[in-house]
Amino acid sequence: MTRRALALLVLCVAAPGSPAADAPITAVVTHPTGFNLKGADDAPQLLVTGIRADGRSIDLTGAAQYAVGDPKIVRVEPNGRVFPLANGSTEITVRVAGKALKVPVVAGKMETPLPINFANHVVPIFTKLNCSSGGCHGKIAGQNGFRLSLLGFDPPFDYENLLKEGRGRRVFPAAPDSSLLLTKAIGAVPHGGGKKMEKDSEEYKIVRRWIASGLPYGDKSDPTVTRISVFPESRVLDRKGRQQLAVHAHYSDGSVEDVTRRAQYESNDTDIATVTEAGLVSTLSITGQAAVMARFNGQVTVFRAAVPRAGAVAAFDFKEQTVVDRHTAKKWNELNIAPSELCSDEVFIRRLYLDLTGTLPEAEEVRAFVADKGAEKRGALVDRLLETPEYAYFFANKWADILRVKRRNQPNRAYGTFAFHTWIREAVTADKPYDDFVRDILCAIGDESKSPPTVWYKEVKTPEQFVDDVSQVFLGQRLACANCHHHPYEKWSQDDYWGVAAFFGRVGFKSVQTPGASPQNQQNQKQVLFVRSAGAVQNKRTGQTAPMKALDADPMTAASDEDPRQKFADWMVSPKNPFFAKTVANRYWAHFFGRGIVDPLDDMRVTNPPSNPELLDALTQTLVDNKYSLKALIRTICKSRTYQLSAEPNEFNTGDKQSFARYYPKRLQAEVLFDAVMKLTDSPTSFAGLPTDKFAPTRAIMLPDESFQSYFLDVTGRPQRISACECERVNEASLAMTLHLLNSQEIQDKIARAGGRADRLARDKRSDAEKVEELFLLATGAKPTKEKMDLALEHIAKHEKSKKTAYENVIWALLNSKAFLFNQ
């Protein structure tokens, strides 16, 4: 049998409509229950909701029939939108599902058009029509000589460009319809962006009225939008279901305005749900969850849709082992899916070893664990592995990636990267409380010989880098784009960005010569971090000194003898902080499950909500209750029944990709795969530039920084620690990786090494069946099936005169199998 045949052998690893949809409608309600309309532009959305006998709410807005008591006062479109026509009072009768209810309406101020505010009424139109998007006039260079602020986040800038640039030709108050702003938008004259609106549209009428009114910007006393809300905030929808949304803007004077047709919408998963420009959400034929973002005037909110599996109820019996299981089971019930069965002991021990220690279990460890009949053996294994050196090294490597422990091929930085890596490893070993761990990094002072965390500041030297890394690593917020403009998918502004940067304003650096070294030898200089008595950061938007202000917090001050970073750290590690503990809880969940409850794991914005908010909150509370013990968090996750589910899908959860109803297999990361190959082939590898004493790292997971040359590690996705994002690490299989494992001289040399595993097995006096079983247990954590055993023994028998070659082939086939390359 050829190697290829062996590889193929080992690679083999093993809705009709929902009854609830027919539940009768027991009640019908409207939102709102009445209207008080002001002016001709006030055309709100009426929502009609049916309450089913099973407790579910369904949207009946498009199915209802509407009748107006006095049709001269208002009219109602079939989609539920209400338009005022004249001053007066009347009522709308809504009939649906055999029920009728009345909605009172008062319309006023129809005789005089209400004043237009440029920021509140005109700018949102540019955003809605994508004129101010990054692909059109909102990009940094503008488009064809005309530039708007990105997504309308800077109305004064937009106002100046519209009125004063282009020699004032864009707007023409004397003849509004002749304004280029309108003629291009309706396609009356050539426009690179194409036709954006109709001449009889509401958008056209508002912009025209603004121009005809003399281009007012608005008074300083005019109310501003402080937030927006969506109704409903969430809903369970059947497949092929629909839900009309209503979006409301809340102003600084306490007033509320319906902006459903002026808001911009976007679904984060168009395979599950789509949304129209009018805010009508439609679900498709896939079970899952989708979030629909609504954006208006720099504010964002989100509607969450859950689409359960169609068909009979997926009943399951799921014993709760930790708080995790309570919330995952609740989500599965909501989605009408059932979890997979528990994984086998063989699968669990390999999974846990790889997830906790980055190490393959020995064959004897697998046998002993399977033979153990104790009911608590899985939990006991979690506890034991958390106390191993491999756990500390593996998670130190994880944090070294995020904290950018990076030498940059500069020999003089080796001392610092080794010291910082050792500090991280010792913190992991001792289960240093996470809040103390972070504070020691943020507020580090001195040099690496006395304070190794100062090495972090060799990569974080500017206020901008401080904001970008701190926000992404410790707060789960990607604030980098708020450096130059308002965050397009969040509420964070440039003022928020520079408010955080201000805490870095007093940090200073200086180089100090190592005692006894030549002053001309820069290789022996150390960077010393200190805090000045004064210092500030300039807000790029205003050009003024930025006040110290944490996210959603009040401005702070620091005396000349205080370190402002300590003030920031106090705010950050507070149990009341909505970002800090939640971010690391999500990060660790993603480590064990392959994806975060919020995914991407460090992009925890309002418009990217968690797939299971209650679960994330419970993990966060677990961390806080246990005084920020990361080991306690790990125990809660790994001892859960949810973590111990099989990767094999069942008929209910085949399409699941968000609710963790089964374990999602993960390819072994670069260092773990490297070490696994070394272990399977029994071919230790040394890395140039490391100490040669007994304390020298002997495995890839133990390497302190990124500078050690290894084509294997590079081709399998090792990050270069250029950024603080875990996305820099590539864990997907690639053609280059596959070819390297199949054909490279490096792999062949390790398999064929004299004294290696193949060589020793060939000389081992045990039976070939025993030796093959041992290989399978080491490589895959499971004994071979009878078919695989027979084929392996047949192959070995054909090479009786060259057993070493036969075992080389078996090992080669195993290390190229999915069972070896993936954590199941």
Image: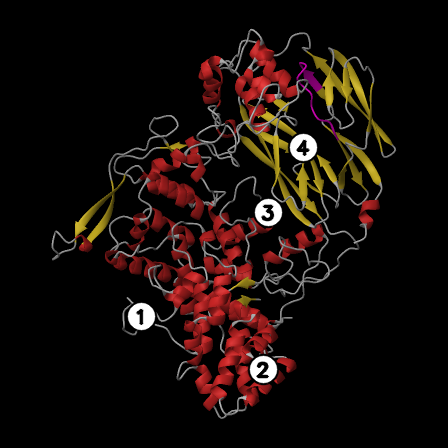
- From the image, tell me which residue sits under label 2: 1
Give the Cα distance between marks 4 and 1: 61 Å
Q: Is residue 115 visible?
A: no
- From the image, tell me which residue sits under label 4: 279
Say whether disc 4 or disc 1 marks the residue closer to the N-terminus. Answer: 4
Crowding around mark 2 (Cα neighbors within 10 Å: few <14, some 14 to 19, many 20+) is some
Give the percent coordinates (x, y) of residue 580: 46, 46
Q: Is residue 522 magenta?
A: no
Give the residues in magenta: 36-47
Q: Which mark is residue 613?
A: 3
Q: Amino acid at mark 2?
A: Met
Tell me the residue at 18%/55% (across/down): 524
Tell me the residue at 56%/58% (across/down): 593
Prevailing secondary structure class for the magenta stretch in the rendered image: loop
Left or right: residue 518 compared with residue 593: left
Left or right: residue 369 compared with residue 546: right
Mark whose residue sits in front, 4 or 3: 4
Say whether disc 1 or disc 3 marks the residue closer to the N-terminus. Answer: 3
Give the percent coordinates (x, y) of residue 422: 33, 61
SS at badge 4: loop
Say whether disc 2 or disc 1 marks the residue closer to the N-terminus. Answer: 2
- From the image, tell me which residue sits under label 1: 696
Say whether disc 2 or disc 3 marks the residue closer to the N-terminus. Answer: 2
Give the Cα distance between marks 4 and 3: 24 Å
Tell me the residue at 50%/28% (across/down): 137
Q: Which mark is residue 32?
A: none
Say whether disc 2 or disc 4 marks the residue closer to the N-terminus. Answer: 2
Q: Is residue 46 magenta?
A: yes
Give the Cα distance between marks 2 and 4: 61 Å
Q: Amino acid at mark 3?
A: Pro
Q: Quadrant of the C terminus?
A: bottom right
Q: Within the image, what quadrant is residue 25 found in?
A: top right
